[in-house]
Amino acid sequence: MSIEIKNINKHFGDFQALKNINLHVETGQLVSLLGPSGCGKTTLLRIIAGLEFADNGQVILDGQDMTNRSVQERNIGFMFQHYALFRHMTVFDNVAFGLTVLPRSQRPSKKEIKERVTHLLELVQLPHLANSFPAQLSGGQRQRIALARSLAVRPKLLLLDEPFGALDAKVRKELRQWLRRVHHELGVTSILVTHDQEEALEISDNIVLMNHGRIEQEGSGSYLYHQPQTPFVTEFLGEATAFEGVVEGSRWHFNEFSVALTDDQSGQEVRDGAARAYVRPHQWRLSRPTEHNGFMLHGYLQDVQDLGPFVRLHVIDEDQGQEVDVFLPQQIQQEADYKKGERIALSPESVTVFNR
């Protein structure tokens, strides 16, 4: 199912939750609505579902205007943070429930229901729990069953609202990888609401990053991370340290240091004048300082944290006291052997610049 959102606005009293939202989702895509709490992502999901109605604008599903149609007319499956499984029913009956309550003219035979439920339990890798009850399952298992139940009626669109939010980090990571595999196998158009950047980056075909009821930027995770178009996108998606400087000609200047701007280094077309530059932790070039080495910052290494495949160096700038985090691959750290308390010189290999 393709989705076309056109000029959607939504108020709750005096508060405007959505501001002129336009969005296109192609058939078969898994798209994440990402953003901080209160940005409007769940409201947009509910409008797509037909659980809320917009003040104006259109919701077009597979070329049909469904703006004022009920949720029952939209052929949508739901998966929420709280599983809402029926405690008195077995796993098998929970998955089969949506099929058993279909109108008689649409209801599959008992044989077809059994075949479909069995297939879905195999798909979510839990066929051995068919006769178990929800209370006997782990949180991760319950969420898999909730997904199987939502897929039983063969929806054209699957909506997932913070589905893994109540689970611990290890289980969330396992289920993200699993959901990605299931989605590719079934090919059903899916929209995921999340505030977890790692989750969105790991499983999405496209990310729609929202803030204060607006879409800040949309595209692949790689595109948003490497070519952010606003300071909010830069700061929200991944880590970055900001520095206040000036653009003159085609260079950004910070004290005596300057760096040339290229299309890749600028998040937007920048003008001469005050400009903020962002540097991500992996973009720093480090050295032990000499008297004249042309580096942007000089500071002291306050802490060294071993994070497995890489090391985080926490540096304090000696001039302004600004804190800077640097990620180094283990091999480079082992060769350089930077130690806590040592004086360090830093310069960015690239920057992302926005006018103030």
Image (spheres, rainbow, N blue to C red):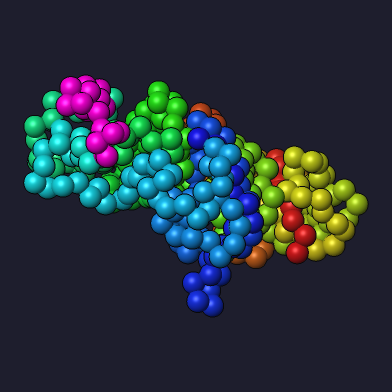
Question: x, y (%) of residue 250?
Answer: 87, 48
Question: x, y (%) of residue 213?
Answer: 57, 62
Q: For the C terminus, which image quadrant?
A: bottom right
Q: How many marks?
A: 0
Most foreground residue, 203 or 295: 203
The extreme bottom residue here reads 14
Is residue 9 covered in magenta? no
| Residue 79 appears in the figure | yes
Whether residue 285 is situated above or below residue 8 in the rendered picture: above
Is residue 111 covered in magenta? yes
Most foreground residue, 27 or 132: 27
| Residue 307 appears in the figure | no
Kindly identify the residue that appears in the image at 49 percent across and 60 percent down. 53
Kindly identify the residue that appears in the image at 68 percent across and 54 percent down. 230
The extreme right residue here reads 249
Relative to 49, is 300 on the left or the right?
Answer: right
Relative to 297, is 54 on the left or the right?
Answer: left
Kindly identify the residue that appears in the image at 64 percent across and 56 percent down. 7
Question: x, y (%) of residue 44?
Answer: 50, 55
Whether residue 57 is situated above or below residue 15 in the rendered picture: above
Judged by its main secondary structure, the magenta piece is helix
Kindly identify the residue that appears in the image at 42 percent across and 53 percent down. 70
Magenta residues (range): 102-121
Q: Quadrant of residue 110?
A: top left
Question: x, y (%) of residue 289?
Answer: 67, 46
